[in-house]
Image (spheres, grey):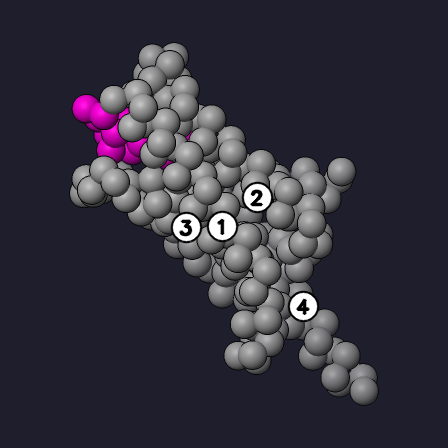
Amino acid sequence: MKAFWLSFVPLFVAVDAIGLFPIFLGLTEGMGGKEIRRTIRQSVVTAALVALGFLGGGSALMRLLGITVADFMVAGGVLLFVISLADLLATKKRLRKPDGESLGAVPLGVPLIAGPAVLTTTLLLSNEYGAFPTALALVSNICLAGAVFWFAPAINRLLGQTGARTASKISSLLLAAIAVMIVRKGILAFVAAGLGQGSG
């Protein structure tokens, strides 16, 4: 249970469901209720399949390319930091309105829900806490994002535009802090591996 929650919190920040729901409102503007529900289902299924596929095959890909966990931690941490910094400095998230038929899969499912931050965080957490707790936390957060989309109009009325923007910025700040922690752990792994080779 502890591993689940340790995986859930970073993935909750990486998914940034609160930050995504204003985009969802903009993309689904003018759609009927039936179309919106179909779009939500499509986005959740697509994001889950892509993220779980990456969770299952990411480690094998790393071994094939000769990438160590420490390498991925440093690179992934830097990537997460850049993503969070871009969100913190951005005044507005802009996105061109896509075709309604594929809206749930692209861009909502990928890359908005299962984007670089989520895929990187998933692989790092899997190495840290195990595949099953990470997969459970991943699916829970994707379903939570779907629930946020479902209740987006009500949440928008509750938080207001300023409240939604503030919540998104706080999530980005937390993601930046998590990114720094991941880089620190990667550097410590490099140092430990170097000391181990030196003593050998």
What's the magenta region?
17-31
Q: Identify residue for label 4.
A: 189
Q: Residues within 10 Å of mark 4 (few under 14, many from 20)?
A: some
Numbered mark located on residue 138 in the image: 2
Task: Tell whether 38 sits left or right of 80.
Answer: left
Residue depth check, mark 4 versus mark 3: number of the one nearer the observer: 3
Residue 74 percent location from the top left of the image: 54, 64
Label 1 vs label 2, nearer the camera: 1
Residue 12: x and y, percent? 53, 38
> Can you see residue 146?
yes
Say which amino acid is labelled 3: Gly
Question: What amino acid type is highlighted by mark number 2?
Answer: Leu
Give me the C-alpha separation between circle 3 and circle 2.
12 Å
CA distance for labels 3 and 1: 13 Å
Question: Is tag 4's residue or tag 3's residue first in the polypeptide sequence?
Answer: 3
What numbered label is drawn on residue 115?
Answer: 3
Q: CA distance from mark 4 to mark 3?
A: 26 Å
Q: Quadrant of the C terminus?
A: bottom right
- For the residues marked 1 and 2, what is the alpha-carbon distance in whole angstroms? 11 Å
Would residue 164 appear left or right of 2 to someone viewing this image? left
59 or 74, nearer to the observer: 59
Q: Is residue 183 visible?
A: no
Circle 1 residue? 49
Q: Tell me if 161 is positioned left or right of 40 in this view.
A: left
In the displayed structure, 74 sits above or below 166; it is below
Number of marks drawn? 4
Which is nearer the eye, 32 or 154? Answer: 32
Which residue is found at the position 64% from the left and 72% from the top? 190
Q: Are marks 2 and 4 in contact (CB under 8 Å)?
A: no
